[in-house]
Image (cartoon, coloured by chain):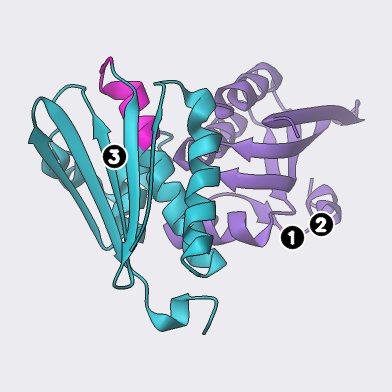
Amino acid sequence: MPELNIDAKVLDAQENAVYIKLTGFLDGHTSPRLKAVFEKLYSKESVKIIVDMAGVSYISSTGIGTLMGALNLSEKNKGVLKICSLPTKILNIISMLGFDQVLPIHKTSEEAISLL
Amino acid sequence: MITFKESIPRDKVFLNNVRNNTKYFCSQCNIRKDIIDTIEISVDEIIVNIIEYSNGKLPIEYIFTYKDNVFECKIIDDGAPFDLVKHLENIDISDYIKKRRERGLGLYIVKKFMDTLNIERKENKNIFTLSKKIFAKETVNA
């Protein structure tokens, strides 16, 4: 399994909606690649991103910080960020640290897409 | 007593190896999976901090022990002296969340998930010690 696979596809070109499916782990080594993807996508205004984390097996503080950074970028550029399908392990870590209070987390991709 | 010891180069590509060793060691100690998850991230955070900030030259050594239901991890690094107390004093998690800060959370995580986090300076090296008592209900035998 690759350390982090970032599979991004356009969900709706008119709506500037992009679906990013992550597989692997989000740590101090891999997170900068994801951060670069967010920075590129949010360089345009009004971009909507759904991040599907079903395939993520580990997240560190750098990974959480990358998601926080994406949220900041989305708001700065009038975009939208939705994070969905977090495995229990990942959701537990994020919740224990209190970041579930600010990160836009949704149970399923269907729910996240419906709220775009 | 169960022990494990390894040295890794100062490169983040080795973080996953450390995490796999942490998980394997803790599972050998019959620690419950959700508790292993918190130990895994704690060890990872210390090592990534060392790689990013300490400017040491030698490989990073880490030693796990499990004795009398206490998990302990020592991480030894030849980098610059580190003022742990000062660093932890400056961390306010509610401020992090409120201001949506993106960096600097690592040691807070360790402090939250482990019972103790200490650092001592010996022979020009920093020795980080993390420990956590594992209660019976936190084992797979519970």
Label 1 secondary element:
loop
- In front: label 1 or label 3: 3
- The magenta segment is B47-57
| Contact check, label 1 and label 2, Cβ < 8 Å | yes
Which residue is more in the foreground, B103 or A93? Answer: A93
Q: Is residue B112 left or right of residue B87?
A: right
Magenta stretch prevailing secondary structure: helix
What SS does tag 2 mark? helix
Name the mark nearer the viewer: 1 or 2: 1
Which residue is tagged 1? A107
Residue A19 is situated, as x and y percent measured from the top left of the image, at 82, 35
The structure residue drawn at horizontal position 55% and vertical position 62%, both measured from the top left corner, is A92
Query: Label 3 vs label 2: CA separation?
Result: 43 Å
Residue drawn where x is 33% and y is 28% of the image: B60
Residue A49 visible in the picture: yes
Chain letter of the cyan region: B
Between disc 3 and disc 2, the foreground one is: 3
Inspect the magenta stretch and tell me whether residue B86 lies in it.
Answer: no
- Name the residue that disc number 2 marks: A111
Q: Is residue A27 visible?
A: no
Horizontally, residue A94 falls left or right of residue B51, namely right
Pick whichever, A51 or A25, lies toward us: A25
Q: Secondary structure at mark 3?
A: strand
Q: Chain under label 3?
A: B
